[in-house]
Image (cartoon, grey):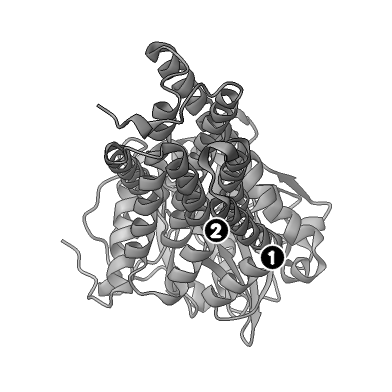
């Protein structure tokens, strides 16, 4: 049986409503902290499915630990609840800056990540049991549980809608953690004032205000903290950073030029991006007799479009990229539009912001040449763009005599991933001609030419190329022994084996271990 001092003496009266509103607020905040941790882990470590799965699992487990531990608190529940709200607000509110700092400065980042998730989850797990015990004399048990849990679930719904639609693109991860930490502390402040005659702890109220001031200052200076944390993450000064609903876009400028990072992963360096894009576009484009209509999937930076426009035979280019923020930056921001030669402003170019996987299915147009320039298949959401399902849709959009050029990761570092792409293209009913090019920033990089019929290569390249020559182009289709084909499975929508191949190859490379292939 609980101690007589488990709940405040006498009915709570209107205070019942105050505490029920608190249930909704703390439920919203609790899920936001979980989403923040999962998103930051995905940005910094990649593989969003793994990161979200493990973060959610650890968070729910720690909430269970917190709920279990609540049974050992048997007195002064209202005071303990206020103290928990202050702690949750501080720990949850400081999660973004703490995790970004830890990634830049601490080798054992995963220990910090899951430690922070565990502490936050334990504190969040204490909240609802405390509130139920505080309110147990105000309602019949069945009514109390239904009210508290329904408000808890409504708060979770609010968080799940707010996070992707408003917080990430408009508020940002850093400011969001401070704002919702502040909401948790506001619950403590509100409870302190409303029940001041019951708890009689002026120092507790002062602590709540102190925590609120810390989080308020954090929210006020969150842009500076974000800039500081990104300076720690990137070698060169950050000249632009934006968060869209789909990714974190960062551009840096240093001695070797401008670099583009998406979710922390390098996409190009102006030092040598021309090598990558010339190799991606021109071997396939030259092999098509009349490439009047061209489609680019991905490549929102406009570099591939720039290369296409060098060929006067190209009359129209349709660029399909998921993220309008990406295409806007490289079309409208003068400093970055210059990098692609203002290609996205050309009257020959139409920009469509859509999911290429869905767009290919719904669009009936056909094209003479298609460039597939997606990021590497680090996650399952990207891996679907390398499946037999996707390549069959791609084949359906090619005209007779047409071809597609597909970026296909490194055949040296992630050899099985590269040949998996090749075999997946073939399994989709297309002829595949693999090739590779040295790009100093990335090393050996791989591509696949796909076509409905066998493709005869040509070296009729447009003038002005900086890297590709007829002799160089012919050499790209020769593979040395250490990049030769290896046995692989086909990447299908229901298995996504390519994501695993890619992760294993690049992890071995990052660890400095010899890249082995069974």
Does 387 sit left or right of 12 as displayed?
left
Q: Earlier in the sequence, mark 1 or mark 2?
A: 1
To which residue does mark 1 refer? 221
Query: What separation in Å lies between label 1 and label 2 (alpha carbons)?
Result: 50 Å
Determine which quarter of the picture holds residue 338.
Answer: bottom right
- Judge whether residue 293 can be spotted in this image: no
Please identify, in this view, whether the residue under mark 1 or under mark 2 is nearer the observer: 1
Determine which quarter of the picture holds residue 162.
Answer: top right
Closer to the camera, 264 or 385?
264
In percent of width and height, residue 146 lies at 44, 16
To which residue does mark 2 refer? 284
In percent of width and height, residue 148 lies at 46, 23
Give the label on residue 426, or none: none
Q: Secondary structure at mark 2?
A: helix
Q: Is residue 2 above or below residue 437?
A: above
Residue depicted at 53% across the width and 64% down the height: 97
In percent of width and height, residue 204 lies at 54, 52
Which of the image's four quarters has the N terminus?
top left
Q: How many other residues sit within 10 Å of disc 2, few (<14), some (14-19) or many (≥20)?
A: many
Does 65 sit left or right of 225 as displayed?
left
Q: How many other residues sit within 10 Å of disc 1, few (<14), some (14-19) or many (≥20)?
A: few
Q: Is residue 391 above or below residue 307?
A: above
């Amino acid at each position: 049986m609980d101690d007589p001092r488990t709940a405040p003496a006498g009915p709570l009266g209107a205070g019942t409503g105050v505490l029920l509103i608190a249930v909704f607020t703390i439920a919203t905040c609790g899920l936001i902290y979980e989403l923040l941790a999962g998103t930051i882990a995905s940005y910094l470590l990649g593989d969003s499915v793994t990161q979200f799965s493990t973060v959610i699992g650890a968070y729910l487990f720690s909430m269970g630990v917190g709920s279990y531990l609540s049974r050992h608190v048997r007195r002064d529940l209202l005071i303990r609840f206020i103290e928990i709200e202050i702690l949750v607000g501080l720990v949850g509110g400081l999660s973004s800056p703490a995790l970004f700092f830890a990634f830049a400065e601490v080798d054992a980042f995963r220990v910090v990540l899951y430690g922070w998730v565990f502490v936050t989850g334990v504190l969040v797990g204490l909240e609802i049991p405390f509130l139920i015990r505080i309110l147990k004399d105000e309602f019949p048990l069945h009514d109390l549980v239904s009210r508290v849990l329904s408000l808890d679930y409504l708060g979770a719904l609010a968080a799940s809608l707010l996070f992707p639609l408003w917080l990430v693109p408009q508020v940002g991860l850093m400011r969001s953690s401070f704002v919702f930490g502040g909401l948790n502390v506001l619950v403590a402040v509100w409870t302190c004032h409303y029940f001041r005659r019951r708890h009689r702890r002026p120092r507790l109220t002062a602590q709540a205000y102190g925590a609120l001031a810390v989080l308020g200052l954090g929210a006020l200076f969150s842009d500076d903290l974000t800039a500081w944390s990104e300076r720690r993450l990137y070698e060169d000064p950050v000249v632009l950073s934006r968060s869209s609903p789909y990714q974190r876009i960062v551009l840096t400028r240093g001695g070797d030029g401008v670099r583009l990072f998406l979710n922390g992963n390098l996409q190009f360096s102006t030092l040598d991006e021309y090598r990558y894009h010339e190799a991606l576009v021109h071997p396939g484009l030259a092999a098509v007799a009349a490439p009047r209509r061209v489609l680019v999937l991905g490549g929102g930076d406009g570099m591939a479009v720039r290369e296409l426009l060098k060929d006067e035979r190209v009359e129209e280019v349709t660029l399909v990229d998921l993220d309008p923020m990406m295409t806007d930056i490289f079309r409208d921001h003068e400093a970055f539009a210059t990098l692609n030669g203002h290609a996205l402003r050309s009257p020959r170019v139409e920009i469509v912001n859509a999911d290429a996987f869905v767009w290919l299915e719904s669009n009936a147009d056909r094209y003479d040449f298609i460039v597939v320039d997606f990021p590497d298949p680090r996650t399952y959401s990207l891996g679907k763009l390398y499946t037999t399902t996707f390549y069959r849709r791609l084949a359906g959009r090619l005209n007779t005599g047409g071809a597609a050029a597909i970026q296909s990761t490194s055949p040296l570092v992630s050899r099985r991933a590269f040949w998996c792409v090749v075999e997946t293209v073939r399994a989709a009913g297309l002829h595949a001609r693999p090739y590779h090019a040295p790009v100093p920033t990335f090393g050996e990089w791989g591509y696949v030419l796909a076509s409905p019929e066998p493709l005869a290569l040509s070296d009729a390249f447009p003038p002005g190329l900086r890297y590709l020559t007829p002799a160089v182009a012919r050499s790209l289709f020769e593979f040395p022994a250490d990049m030769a084909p290896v046995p692989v499975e086909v990447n299908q929508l229901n298995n996504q084996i390519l994501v695993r191949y890619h992760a294993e190859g690049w992890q071995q490379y990052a660890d400095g271990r010899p890249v082995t292939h069974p």
